[in-house]
Amino acid sequence: MRSDGPAMAAPEDPLRKRKAGVVGPAPESPPGPGRDPAGCPARLRAGTFWLTRIMLLKALAFVYFVAFLVAFHQNKQLIGDTGLLPCRVYLRSVQQHFRGQVSWETVSYAPTVLWLLDWSHMDFNLDALALLGLGISSFILVSGCANMVLMAALWVLYMSLVNVGQIWYSFGDRACPWAARRTPGTMSISVGKLLRAVGWESQLLETGFLGIFLCPLWTLSPLPRGTPTSRIVLWGYRWLIFRIMLGAGLIKIRGDQCWRDLTCMDFHYETQPVPNPVAYFLHHSPWWFHRFETLSNHFLELVVPFFVFLGRQMCILHGALQILFQMVLIISGNLSFLNWLTIVPSLACFDDATLGFLFPSGPGCLKDQVLRMQEEEARGARAPRTHGSVARHTVNLALGVLVAWLSVPVVLNLLSPRQVMNSSFNPLRIVNTYGAFGSITKERTEVILQGTASPNASAPDAKWEDYEFKCKPGDLKRRPCLISPYHHRLDWLMWFAAFQTYEHNEWIIHLAGKLLANDAQALSLLALNPFAGRAPPRWVRGEHYRYKFSRPGGTHAAEGKWWIRKRLGPYFPPLSFQDLKGYFRSREWPYPKPE
């Protein structure tokens, strides 16, 4: 039986190895999708931007959605058939300036599809543009995919609104050279200017224009394999965020002395256009905190933008710092969708490896599909060169040349000691200059609209009652609103009107006329009508007040007051319905009917 020993012992060797946890070589099997050969989840490689495109499209679609929502809710009251500044009157004045014809010059001065529509139902036209924009942006926001046709449609729709929005779609600059200019009985247009006053509306148009070239022509897929994300478009976005931040930093250093003295933040939170509740508490921060804020602002706007050109790691750091900065601004004030929009080009600083943690893992998910494409590319698999791909490369190169050419005056403006902020050098607003708060107002003034039912406006016993706006300060006990990214355009313009005069803001007299008629459309822009459910006021006036935040823990705060105010004097005198008939007629404004 001993002769069998060696034969019987042979199988024991692998058995001992198995007991010890050591196994012999087994047939190889490929690792599962999304896992490395060791069985661990695989990580996305740096250098591809498939997920970046999805994030860019979703973020841009979100901003478009908010912008079109604001347009749908407010355009009829502001620029509609009976709006405060009817766009039909504006378009007619442009047409008359160009000899009464809708020529190429006319359309290029104010590019809008409204030239092609029936002006007799402008409310319907404005609603149709806004609703179409809402529908397209909702689809892209939910699906994360788009094509050039959809993105171009969004851009054309919003440009059509911006170019007839007049002062409501500007930053509030009363010297806006493309706005309609009126003297009683006439209408004239200022032309021949190189600069067109703009704001975040043009920033959205520039961001949206680049977004057109992120996508394939027709294909609707989150990951269109035949259309990798264009590096030229990504650098277009990086160039955009560089100009936005550097322009904002330079206009501050060259502007108000308080930016150089590091004292601007002592005033900003209280005097910004539409403060929020957080601004109340930040305003009362210690002096050293305000100095730190100002220094941090200079660092983020004057130094950090150059990180975008210093390689992948510094570019990622740039994107992260700018997004964090914008989030702080969102928390501390109601600046419409401006800061949300500024986040969009910052996303172009991140590649798939950086953004992968935002996407779920698992077989068949977007992250897994990107990993598969990266593996195929690593093995040398490349999409065949087709006529379509050649055409696309040609278009992208043309885009790069166009942006470079249009950037020349913008760069010269950045380098100029007489830098102009928030301006465009072309009617399509493809490449613009940016900047904000080059000067800081040191005290806050407000226009308070009041009405009275008294037959004698100058009677000592006349009871004047305040109208309340949606968001701007008025009632001393009303908590500051928190609305970002939404935007109340009338409230915003009331801030500018407060440190100008009513002669510079004729729309405020139009608003007063509508309040005298209890006009439901105009009143929908306000939060409180003191004459609701009763006869309209006989007189309306504007009063000028200085507003300041109450001190936390102080007497006024103990009474529930967020604000304290002091009357400065009249803004415009008491007006009656009869006083405004000639004023309305000379400006071709529809005369409101008392309700």
Image (tube, rainbow, N blue to C red):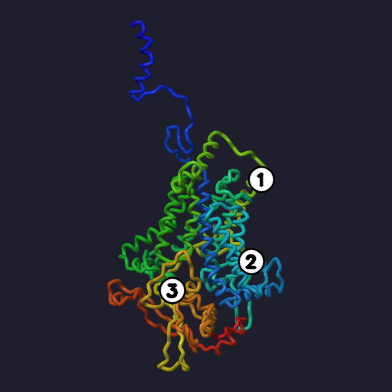
Q: Position of residue 105 (x, y in %)?
A: 69, 67
- Residue bearing the label numbered 2: 112
Mark 2–mark 1 Cα distance, whole angstroms, equals: 30 Å
State how many labels appear: 3
Q: SS at mark 2? A: loop
Residue 502 seen: yes
- Categorize mark 2 by other alpha carbons within 10 Å: few (<14), some (14-19), many (20+): many
Amino acid type shown at disc 1: Gly
Q: Residue 249 or 134: which is nearer the viewer?
A: 134
Q: Is residue 122 above or below residue 231?
A: below
Q: Is residue 253 above or below residue 403?
A: below
Q: Quadrant of the N terminus?
A: top left
Q: SS at mark 1? A: helix
- Residue bearing the label numbered 1: 388
- Residue bearing the label numbered 3: 472
Nearer-N-terminus badge (1/3)? 1
Q: Position of residue 440 (x, y in %)?
A: 42, 69
Q: Residue at x 59, y 37 (%)?
A: 382
Amino acid type shown at disc 3: Lys
